[in-house]
Image (cartoon, grey):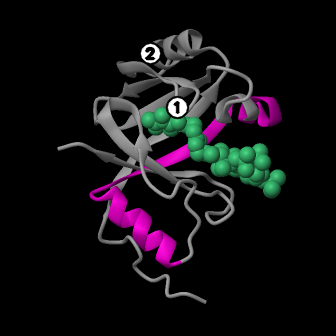
């Protein structure tokens, strides 16, 4: 059993966002704006991840991410087909994603990618597989300075 205490404890800043898989991005944005009072912060296409995503913010700075599939074979497309709409990820902001990925790998905690990928708002992202975290996909996100 590898040592898993404090693996990335000094690198985690806090919860960055909760991500929802949605069928229709425009309708979902409208719902979060109209019903819950969130404000659209950004909207972009990430071809690498096969998603169109929107980040919405509340007045305290907390964020909701809405993820729509660009095609049925994408991660979100498969998630929607298998499970329907719902929470797809919880994202933690980290101060150093490469170091976090390295430490997780050393501790034999399964990351989805060996190195960082591009995320929204010029971030770098990686993920911890849900089989390690009680069935919840954890995204790790680092924003450029
Ligand atoms: C799959 N499973 C999940 C899950 N996806 N459990 C909780 N949350 C999820 N999101 C479970 C599924 O129920 C199965 O459990 C098992 O994992 C294997 O399922 P699968 O359908 O075969 O899925 P895989 O293995 O093909 O893919 C699972 C992984 C995939 C985690 C590898 O979702 C992935 O690559 N995720 C990272 C990329 C990503 O999520 N991109 C979209 C967001 P049982 O049946 O075995 O118990 S992009 C994004 O967030 C961006 C751009 C951003 O933030 O900026």
Give 6 or 36, whichever is nearer the viewer.
Answer: 6
Residue found at the far left of this picture: 145
Magenta segment:
79-107
The residue that disc 2 covers is 33
**Whole-percent x, y for residue 95 in the image:** 27, 57
Pointer 2 local density, CA inside 10 Å: few below 14, some 14–19, many at least 20: some
**Whole-percent x, y for residue 116 in the image:** 42, 50
Pointer 1 local density, CA inside 10 Å: few below 14, some 14–19, many at least 20: few
Give 80 or 50, whichever is nearer the viewer.
Answer: 50
Q: Is residue 57 left or right of residue 69?
A: left
- Which image quarter holds the N terminus? bottom right
Spatial separation of the CA atoms under disc 1 and disc 2: 27 Å
Label 1: element kind? loop
The residue that disc 1 covers is 48
Q: Is residue 74 left or right of residue 60?
A: right
92 in the magenta segment:
yes
Give 65 or 140, whichever is nearer the viewer.
Answer: 140
- Which image quarter holds the C terminus? top left
Q: Residue at x 55, y 33 (%)?
A: 49
């Amino acid at each position: 059993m590898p040592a898993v205490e404090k693996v990335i404890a000094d690198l985690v800043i806090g919860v960055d966002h909760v991500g929802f898989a949605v069928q229709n991005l425009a309708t979902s944005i409208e719902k979060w704006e109209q019903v819950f009072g969130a404000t659209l912060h950004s909207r972009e296409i990430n071809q690498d991840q096969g998603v169109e995503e929107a980040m919405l913010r509340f007045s305290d700075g907390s964020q909701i991410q809405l993820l729509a599939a660009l095609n049925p074979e994408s991660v979100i497309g498969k998630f929607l087909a298998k499970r329907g709409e719902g929470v797809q990820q919880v994202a933690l902001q980290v101060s150093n994603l490469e170091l976090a990925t390295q430490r997780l790998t050393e501790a034999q905690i399964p990351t989805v990618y060996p190195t960082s990928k591009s995320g929204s708002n010029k971030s770098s992202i990686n993920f911890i597989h849900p089989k390690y975290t009680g069935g919840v996909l954890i995204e790790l996100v680092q924003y450029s300075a």
